[in-house]
């Protein structure tokens, strides 16, 4: 056998093996049933339990077997991405939950968890107040409308993921507290709302991960968009991390082919269909099955745009990002966003200062070709909108961040450059100070008026 034939045989064997990987998930209760976890020191396992009693934990067998390098634990980025780390909580919170667990008092564990969670900013950027639209005077559950052109929809069957990311900014969706969860059981309200707002062009189906849904559920939400009265919805975006956590969804799952036919049908009917895929590290695209999944999705005519936050312990390195973008371009995907870790959940462990993020972005962009330079960022998805750090410069002897809105609650704010005092430690918009003698940022009064209810946030 030639070396090429040998390689092909090996790849086929791996592929066949993956066909039989069961979708089996583990949560906090089954942590010690995960084989490699049993080999870790008891103190490390206990620390994982402490964190997993506050922030959601869920991992599947494919991630355990194919993505994590267990010889490199705890530093392995895929391990950091999926398994709870002690630094994700502050010392006080960690010790409180550790004491509660040691006491064995279920009520104490529950109340300690909810007190700590409440202090972790479960719904950042005005999600539960400013983003929720109304229909006939009543708030629409499971829908967010922050930017004029785009509506986010949270289908009730899609409020879980194949595994959970430790850094997740949607963590509050997964902790079993219905008051903290966005979801909508009925598609009718969504379609009704879309019909009434003809300036909406993009529908983003999000979660959780909508790709956990059976194809027929997804079709119930998406096929009505082909009706003439919804022709103004030109783009269907589906937010997903399934290409990383369960690429079998597009290859071996029972309704994988049906899913691909659905995407194909939407594309052929004239919709632009984009999978908004999350990849935090190039390692996620290294398995044959992940590559096959990407190939099959692209074959339908859908595009895959990629996004991820810059995260300490996972991808805080320009070389990782350049390889990430290069691999994505090679596989036919389009790099779209580098985000800043949001001001919620385990941010203390993952966040990176804006100054550092800009350096990482700049170095990474410099080392890829033009086709890899399509990712915008570093960008903060903050209350007023998506704010990008465009650079650091000096104006009149003052060192400043140059910023712009990529998206904003008021479309008129978009693309206006504005300036903030340079500070090496700052990690988020609300820590920035106006520069060049200004007392406020140009959008501040209007945004505060939206927050106080003085003016309506969707005044388009
Ligand atoms: S896939 Fe997205 S929603 Fe799901 S846990 Fe990861 S970041 Fe959160």
Image: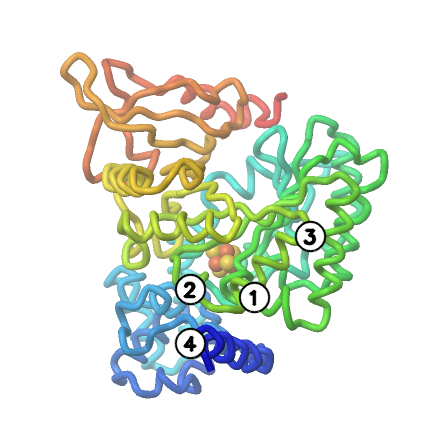
Determine the CA span between mark 4 and mark 2.
47 Å
Q: Earlier in the sequence, mark 1 or mark 3?
A: 1
Mark 1, other Cα within 10 Å: few <14 / some 14–19 / many ≥20: many
Q: Earlier in the sequence, mark 4 or mark 1?
A: 4
Instruction: Tell me the mark number nearer the camera, choosing from 4 and 1.
Output: 4
Q: Earlier in the sequence, mark 2 or mark 1?
A: 2
Which residue occupies 20% across, 40% down?
425
Residue 55 circle label: 2
Residue 50, position as x, y percentages in the image: 34, 72
The residue tagged 3 is 300
Which residue occupies the foreground of this view, 72 or 30?
72
Above or below, 19 relative to 33: above
Which residue occupies the foreground of this view, 131 or 35?
35
The residue tagged 1 is 247
Residue 423 circle label: none
Instruction: Tell me the mark number nearer the camera, choosing from 2 and 3.
Output: 3
Which residue occupies 81% across, 42% down?
226
Instruction: Tell me the mark number nearer the camera, choosing from 3 and 4.
Output: 4
| Mark 2 Cβ inside 8 Å of ligand 1 | no
Which residue occupies 68% across, 31% down?
200
Above or below, 196 relative to 417: below
Determine the CA span between mark 1 and mark 3.
16 Å
Above or below, 148 relative to 58: above
Instruction: Tell me the mark number nearer the camera, choosing from 1 and 3.
Output: 3
The residue tagged 4 is 3
């Amino acid at each position: 056998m030639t070396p090429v034939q040998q390689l092909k045989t090996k790849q086929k064997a791996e592929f066949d093996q993956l066909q039989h990987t069961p979708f089996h998930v583990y949560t906090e209760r089954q942590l010690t049933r995960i084989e490699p976890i049993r080999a870790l020191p008891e103190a490390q396992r206990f620390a994982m339990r402490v964190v997993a009693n506050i922030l959601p934990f869920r991992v599947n067998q494919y991630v355990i077997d194919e993505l994590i390098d267990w010889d490199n634990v705890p530093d392995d980025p895929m391990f950091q991405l999926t398994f709870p780390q002690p630094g994700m909580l502050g010392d006080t919170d960690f010790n409180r939950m550790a004491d509660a667990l040691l006491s064995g008092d279920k009520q104490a564990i529950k109340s300690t968890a909810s007190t700590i969670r409440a202090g972790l900013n479960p719904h950042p950027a005005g999600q539960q107040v400013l983003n929720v639209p109304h229909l006939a005077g009543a708030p629409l559950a499971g829908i967010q409308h922050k930017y004029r052109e785009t509506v986010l929809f949270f289908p009730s069957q899609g409020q879980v993921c194949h595994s959970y990311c430790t850094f997740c900014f949607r963590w509050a969706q997964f902790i079993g507290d219905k008051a903290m969860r966005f979801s909508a059981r009925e598609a009718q309200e969504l379609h009704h709302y879309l019909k009434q707002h003809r300036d909406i062009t993009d529908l983003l189906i999000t979660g959780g991960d909508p790709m956990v849904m059976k194809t027929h559920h997804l079709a119930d939400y998406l096929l009505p968009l082909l009706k003439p009265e919804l022709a103004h919805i030109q783009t269907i975006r589906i937010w997903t991390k399934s290409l990383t956590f369960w690429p079998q969804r597009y290859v071996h799952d029972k309704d994988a082919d049906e899913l691909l036919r659905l995407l194909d049908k939407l594309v052929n009917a004239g919709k632009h269909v984009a999978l908004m895929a999350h990849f935090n590290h190039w390692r996620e695209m290294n398995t044959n099955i992940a590559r096959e999944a990407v190939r099959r999705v692209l074959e339908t005519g859908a595009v895959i745009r990629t996004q991820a936050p810059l995260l300490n312990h996972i991808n805080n390195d320009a070389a990782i990002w350049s390889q990430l973008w290069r691999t994505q371009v090679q596989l036919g995907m389009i790099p779209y966003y580098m985000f800043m870790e949001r001001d919620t959940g385990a941010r203390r462990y993952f966040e990176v200062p804006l100054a550092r993020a800009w350096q990482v972005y700049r170095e990474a962009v410099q080392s890829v070709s033009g086709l890899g330079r399509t990712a915008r960022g570093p960008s903060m998805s903050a209350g007023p909108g998506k704010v990008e750090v465009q650079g650091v410069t000096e104006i009149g002897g003052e060192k400043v961040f140059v910023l712009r809105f990529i998206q904003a609650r008021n479309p008129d704010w978009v693309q206006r450059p504005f300036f903030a005092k340079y500070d090496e430690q700052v990690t988020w918009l609300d820590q920035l100070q106006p520069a060049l003698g200004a007392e406020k940022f140009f959008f501040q009064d209007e945004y505060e008026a939206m927050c106080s209810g003085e003016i309506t946030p969707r005044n388009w």
